[in-house]
Image: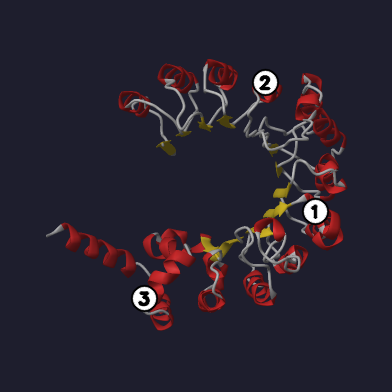
Amino acid sequence: MTQTAHQQNKVTMDYSCLPNDVWLRVMELLCPRDRYRMARTCSLFHELFQHPSFWRRGFLDLTQAIRGEEGSVCLGLRRRSKLVAESFGYFFHHIRFHVPNCQVAIDDSTLELLTNLCESWTVKTVSLVVSSYGTQCSVYGRDTGKPSCLHAAVNVLKSARDLVELDLRQWPVTSDVLAEHERDLGIDRVLADAATFPGLTSLDITWKFNPCSTNSVVQRSPQTAVDLVTKFRCLRHLSLRHVLLSETLLRELACANRSPLRSLSVTCEYDEYSENNDVATQPQLSEDAWTLLKRSFPGFKDSVRTLVKAADLQLVEWTLEAYVPIFSVGLTAYGSPLSEEWLRPLTIWRDTLKALTVGGYYGGQMPCVDHLLVDLVTSCTKLQHLVYHGKISDSTVAHLASLGRKWTVFKFV
């Protein structure tokens, strides 16, 4: 039997595991061409047809259904997604709706689709990532559209009675947009709507802003985190992006001990584009503040992720505190060679570091740091995610790959 025939036979065996009534309904809805197109739109088809045990954990990705410049193309995919959602809604536990920057706003048809999905009692996790404006502002060379109704989408999610995980991200909010349309963005309104989910245990929220902005929304980031912990009584996992990991944030969270918080993920980006950023002048993270936070939440586990994307080594050193456990680090060197000064300090997290991304630009390519990278990876015994952009020898790559790790991501560019 040829390999192709064997693969076809294997697929047939997997398909035969499906109940006949489900298989017939799929065949009635989708022709082969549509099934191929839907495979790119809805990962449920891959999981459902290849792994029958995943039926009750279906994952619906609506991202592709709303992408593209031509509305007619999006409309066809969106109709197909709606048809599948209505016919197989009882399969879906997880919904992913990510709108690329400056592409499409959350319109009425999208809200209708989300409503149809959330009426199913099986929806437990939802991820919403939207741009601030449908066609975005003049910063990107496009006409300014009306604000995306993120709060309307959150309001629709109230019908998902079993929702326990919510991922909200508002993309990019520039200083001029904030100054003119702060009320339309409805950040406070979104928080008020989201706080009505009684069983929410995990919240991942992002307010991406221009670091140079002096707007009040940017300045009150620590207070926003405190409000989240205070409002969500069952919240156990809180993830914040683009929020400065500061002494103020830790102490304010410790004082708002109204929820059984167990893990906190803070992803910070410090980069050279933040011309007016005051990161370097922020107070040092004290061990007392970290201890106070853990004491306020008895079940709290050390879980902080910090993405360091710095051009100035001083900014990197500001976050290098051994008592604040770091799980994920990204180093991007702009205009300076990657050296021992960058990699060696990371060994203080050798017992916790699980993901490392190293990249940069230095005359087209960084100098060779094979021995430094080998020493770092060898000492970080839990490292499973490694991405490196720069000059490195093939023998070093082979050596790193042979360390016996269960690599989830192993990439060299």
The quadrant the N terminus occupies is: bottom left
Given residues 404 and 148, the one toward you in this image is 148
Distance from label 1 to label 3 (Cα)?
A: 45 Å
Residue density around tag 3, few if under 14, some if 14–19, many if 20 or more, within 10 Å: few
Work out whether 368 lies above or below 174: above
Q: Which label lies toward us, 2 or 3?
A: 2
Work out whether 358 lies above or below 341: below
Residue appearing at x 74%, y 55% in the figure:
199
Q: Is residue 258 visible?
A: no
Of helix, strand and loop, which one carries label 1? helix
Question: Residue under circle 2?
Answer: 317
Residue density around tag 1, few if under 14, some if 14–19, many if 20 or more, within 10 Å: some
Q: At which x and y percent is residue 37?
A: 42, 71
The amino acid on which the numbered mark 3 sits, given as a three-letter code, is Arg
Q: At which x and y percent is residue 137?
A: 72, 61
Viewed as shown, does residue 304 lie left or right of 214?
left
Viewed as shown, does residue 234 lie left or right of 37?
right
Distance from label 2 to label 3 (Cα)?
A: 54 Å
The amino acid on which the numbered mark 1 sits, given as a three-letter code, is Asp
Q: Which label lies toward us, 1 or 2?
A: 1
Residue appearing at x 87%, y 46% in the figure:
216
Image mark for residue 176: 1
Given residues 155 and 9, the one toward you in this image is 155
Question: Residue under circle 3?
Answer: 33
The amino acid on which the numbered mark 2 sits, given as a three-letter code, is Glu
Distance from label 1 to label 2 (Cα)?
A: 32 Å
